[in-house]
Amino acid sequence: MPKVNSEQLTRQLNQHIPPIIFIYGDETLLVEEACDTVREKLKQAGFNERELHHTDGAFNWQNLIQNANSLSLFSEKKIIEIRLHNGKPGDSGSKILVEYCAHPSNDTLVLIISPKLERSALNSKWFKQLDQSGFTVPIWPISTEQLPQWLDRRLQKQGLQADSEALDVLAEKVEGNLLAGAQEVDKLTLNCDQTLITGAMMRELVADSARYSVFGLIDKALAGDAIGAGQALNGLRSEGSEPLKLLWALTNEVRTLVTLKEATDNGMSFNQAAKSHRIWKSRERMTQHALNRLPLRRLHLLLRQCIAVDKAVKGIGGDPWALMQDITLGLSGINILNNATHKLLLR
């Protein structure tokens, strides 16, 4: 089957539900929204059970086929969701995926979510088999030039319109951070009583934002301001922010730092790495400070802590806000070694 654009996903699912869907990319917000689209359409189609697995732990790929072919007590259709943490299923996973694609279950959909794939993965046998048997959904970054149009589409979905100047003002405020853009659109929906927003109105509206923001928190953490980052986190919690949205931003930031750290450790200059990964000029200095402060092993630990928060949000162990506090302080350069973190270190 041809690759499915994320904006075409709903229409494609209305026409056909494949046995396997593979969503991959580094724009965390867009990846999660594509996954939400899949889950919603499948729920409408009777897929009422969901299993969630992470491949960075003790995941057994052989169980995929066994779980896919086992009916529940009530014989309901189900989704098996697999978080492929590094874009590589390994030898065992590759063989199982090829085998499953050859004989998929009629009552199970396998949803695989992965970061951006390397060229070698795109040319692999397992990926080509997935591409033939199901939907592969690449999530492409939104460029600086595309951002005003992306924001415009989100505003229109909420029944709002903005002139070109207003869109440029909003794009400049969010500086390429899609989660920031989505949050600003949500605020405009609540606070704007005009259907057409001008540039002057946009300047006034975006200046009157909440005291605490996800991006202010991350910037403080990157700059090493542990106290300020902790205060921002507590402020977001008191304002009723959803932990999952904050987790998206933290995870995306940690993944970016991991990629940058690997590039600079392999000899690439920071300036080259920052340009390659679309780091905004205004954030280069704090990002470089964070890279100088955090070794790669610590960044990998932070990524595993993000996965632990995802589980906690879904009710599997721990307080997500306490875990996110550890991540925030870890980004700031303060090492937290509680029981949960200690277990992660031993993996």
Image (cartoon, rainbow, N blue to C red):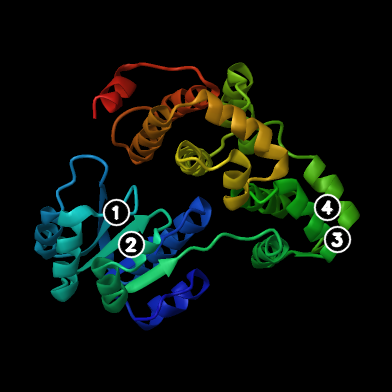
Q: Distance between the Cα atoms at labels 3 and 4?
A: 9 Å
Nearest to the observer: residue 283 or residue 49: 283
Residue identified by numbered label 2: 121
Residue 152, image x, y percentages: 71, 65
Query: Horizontally, is 156 left or right of 77 in the view?
Result: right
Residue identified by numbered label 1: 88
Work out whether mark 3 precedes mark 4 in sequence or the reverse, and give the earlier one: 3
Asked whether residue 244 is in view, the answer is no
Query: Horizontally, is 302 left or right of 182 in the view?
Result: left
Residue identified by numbered label 3: 165
Point out the image quarter for the C terminus: top left
Residue at 22%, 53% in the rendered image: 90
Residue identified by numbered label 4: 202
Q: Which of marks 3 and 4 is in front?
A: 3
Work out whether mark 1 precedes mark 2 in sequence or the reverse, and give the earlier one: 1
Q: Nearer the viewer, mark 4 or mark 2?
A: 2
Query: Horizontally, is 152 left or right of 73 in the view?
Result: right
Indicate the secondary structure of the residue bearing disc 2.
helix
Q: In which quarter of the image is residue 23?
A: bottom left
Asked whether residue 258 is in view, the answer is yes
Q: Distance between the Cα atoms at labels 4 and 2?
A: 43 Å
Is there a contact, CB below 8 Å, between mark 3 and mark 1?
Answer: no
Work out whether mark 2 precedes mark 3 in sequence or the reverse, and give the earlier one: 2
Q: How crowded is mark 1: few (under 14 residues within 10 Å), some or many (20 or more)?
A: some
Indicate the secondary structure of the residue bearing disc 4.
helix
Is there a contact, CB below 8 Å, between mark 3 and mark 4?
Answer: yes
Residue at 48%, 63% in the rendered image: 139
